[in-house]
Image (cartoon, rainbow, N blue to C red):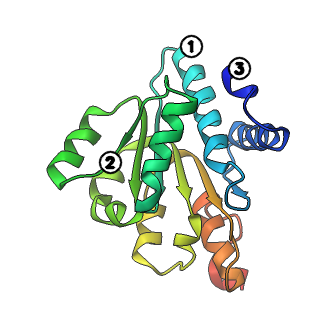
């Protein structure tokens, strides 16, 4: 979006273009960058552009951001600061409140945390999203973990992952994230190993 083009640094504009290109090709992508270099802002720019594109076509736009609980406030603050026209809402509170927010939201971005995702997977897996974005995607590095299985059951046209550490301990960490982004691309884990 023009109002963000002036704010983004050159490498961030390159990152947004890279992500947009991957999405236009129907491929998931990892934005792996050090902490503090603007991964959140790059995703906000991408989502803002996609929302405008959907609006111009008279279509709705839905996205789900899954992040650590401590980062939800950052998503809300940065989206309000840099792209106030992008509707972003936290999916938190008690189960009844989360159900109501999910039922009412048919246009905009929902932000939840990995713990609530596991609790609400019955609701979230039933809802198709245009985007599912994993912030701190290393949270799904263990392919057998409940949170990984929950994330992989989400319906999304586009899947993106943000992380400073796509590979923490072993190569299967990267496989697990890539299997969410582009299911089957690297084969199953045994084949990959």
**N-terminal label among 3 and 2:** 3
| Residue 74, above or below 83 | below
Q: Is residue 161 above or below residue 172?
A: above
Q: Residue at x 63, y 27 (%)?
A: 49
Bin the neighbour count of mark 2 within 10 Å (Cα to Cα): few under 14, some 14-19, many 20 and up: many
Quadrant assignment, res 4? top right
- Mark 2: secondary structure: loop
Residue 172 placement (x, y as % from top left): 66, 81
Residue carrying label 1: 56
Q: Which sits in the foreground, 18 or 130? A: 18
Q: Secondary structure at mark 3?
A: helix
* 168 horizontally vs 76: left or right: right
Q: Position of residue 151 (x, y in %)?
A: 46, 62
What label does residue 2 carry, if any?
3
Q: Is 92 on the left-hand or right-hand side of 7?
A: left
User: Residue at position x 67%, y 61% from top?
Assistant: 35
As measured in the structure, the alpha-carbon distance from the residue carrying label 3 to the one carrying label 1 is 16 Å
């Amino acid at each position: 979006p023009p109002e963000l083009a002036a704010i983004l640094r050159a490498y961030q504009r390159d990152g947004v273009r890279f992500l947009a290109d991957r999405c236009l090709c129907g491929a998931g992508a990892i934005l792996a960058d050090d902490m503090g270099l603007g991964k959140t802002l790059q995703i906000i720019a991408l989502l803002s552009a996609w929302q405008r594109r959907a609006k111009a076509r008279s279509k709705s736009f839905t996205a789900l951001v899954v992040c650590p609980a401590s980062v939800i406030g950052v998503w809300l603050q940065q989206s309000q600061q840099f792209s106030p026209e992008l509707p972003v809402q936290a999916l938190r509170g008690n189960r009844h409140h989360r159900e109501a927010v999910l039922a009412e939201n048919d246009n905009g971005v929902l932000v939840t945390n990995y713990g609530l995702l596991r609790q609400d997977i019955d609701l979230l897996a039933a809802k198709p999203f245009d985007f599912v974005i994993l912030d701190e995607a290393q949270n799904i590095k263990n392919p057998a973990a409940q949170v990984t299985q929950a994330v992989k059951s989400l319906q999304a046209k586009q899947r993106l992952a943000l992380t400073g550490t796509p590979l923490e301990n072993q190569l299967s960490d990267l496989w697990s994230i890539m299997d969410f982004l582009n299911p089957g691309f690297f084969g199953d884990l045994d084949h990959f190993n």
